[in-house]
Image (cartoon, rainbow, N blue to C red):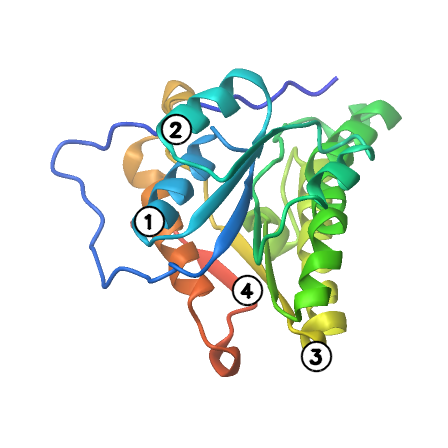
Amino acid sequence: MFPKASRPDLPTPEQGRHVRLKAMANLGSSTVMLTGAGGALATAIAQELEDAGAQLVLVGRGEALARAADRFPATEVIDVDLADPACVEQLRRVKVDTLIHTTGDYAQQDAQKATDQDLREMFDSNMLTLFHAVQGVLPGMIKQKDGLIMGVSAGQAARLSGPKAALYTASKAAVAAYVLSVHDELKAKGVRGIVLYPMGAIDTPENREAGLKWEETIDPRGLAKSVAHALTRPDRAHVTELKVYPDH
């Protein structure tokens, strides 16, 4: 069995550490569905989107979702298991023009010890949840001839290799291939796709406890600013793949 990834709140940055601010993105006309609400990355993205004026639809589970709902005003708060196909009809009741999918898990394991159950769990968490989320929002996006889907992949998937993480790397590579294929298929109908590749571990309390230093990790606020920037690109300057590296 794979351990479930924790969903910590945003970490406190190191004293003196800051993100170089650029012009604030304007997303005042956007309604964004954000999955994995309450996670470190989703929290940073939600703050950036709120600052940019976007309307939020928060999707998540349990206490993490409740914390996000308390912190950020949202037009809808949906507590649902995205691995359950029954969630699709629930998501279809909400009109959005952007989906940012951050739900997923990470695990390390020796390749020779991996089991069928491990495979199912990793692909259910990282790929099946994305599939259901897209199936939920896609009919509305196609009808309004406007939509943007962002999936969060991983640096290992971008390199197509990851020692002791073969199933994780494969599942995140599937995320990228799926989003890019949807983009190629539906861009003529106004639906576009973006793959976000964090090219390193994200700065969270869990990763710090594991011994990672802040200069070796990516500040989730920096990732969030990159996300907002990508969301505001015009059609003729659309970003399909976005790689964000640690600052070292």
Looking at the image, can residue 15 be seen? Answer: yes
In primary-sequence order, the first of circles 4 and 2 is 2
Above-or-below relation of 183 to 90: below
Note whether residue 180 is visible. Answer: no
Q: Residues within 10 Å of mark 2 (few under 14, many from 20)?
A: many
Amino acid identity at mark 3: Ala
Identify the residue under disc 3: 188
Q: Which residue is mark 4?
A: 241
Q: Residue at x 52, y 21 (%)?
A: 6
Check disc 1 and report its element: helix, strand or loop: helix
Q: Amino acid at mark 1?
A: Gly
Which part of the image, by quadrant, shows the N terminus? top right
Q: Could you tell me how far apart the alpha carbons at marks 1 and 2 are, in whole angstroms?
A: 13 Å
Mark positioned earlier in the residue sequence (4 or 3): 3
**Among numbered discs 2 and 3, the one appearing first in the sequence:** 3
N-term mark: 1 or 4: 1
Q: Amino acid at mark 2?
A: Thr
Image position of 26 (left or right of 18): right
Secondary element at tag 2: loop
Is there a contact, CB below 8 Å, between mark 2 and mark 3?
no
Q: Position of residue 162 (x, y in %)?
A: 63, 43
In terms of image quadrants, where is residue 12? top left
Q: Earlier in the sequence, mark 3 or mark 1?
A: 3
> Label 2, on which residue?
204
Give left or right: position of 91 versus 39. Answer: right
Nearer-N-terminus badge (1/2): 2
Residue kind at label 4, given as amino acid type: Glu
Mark pair 1, 4: CA separation = 16 Å
Q: CA distance from mark 2 to mark 3?
A: 39 Å
Residue under the image location 44 percent in, 72 percent down: 233
**Res. 222 mark:** 1
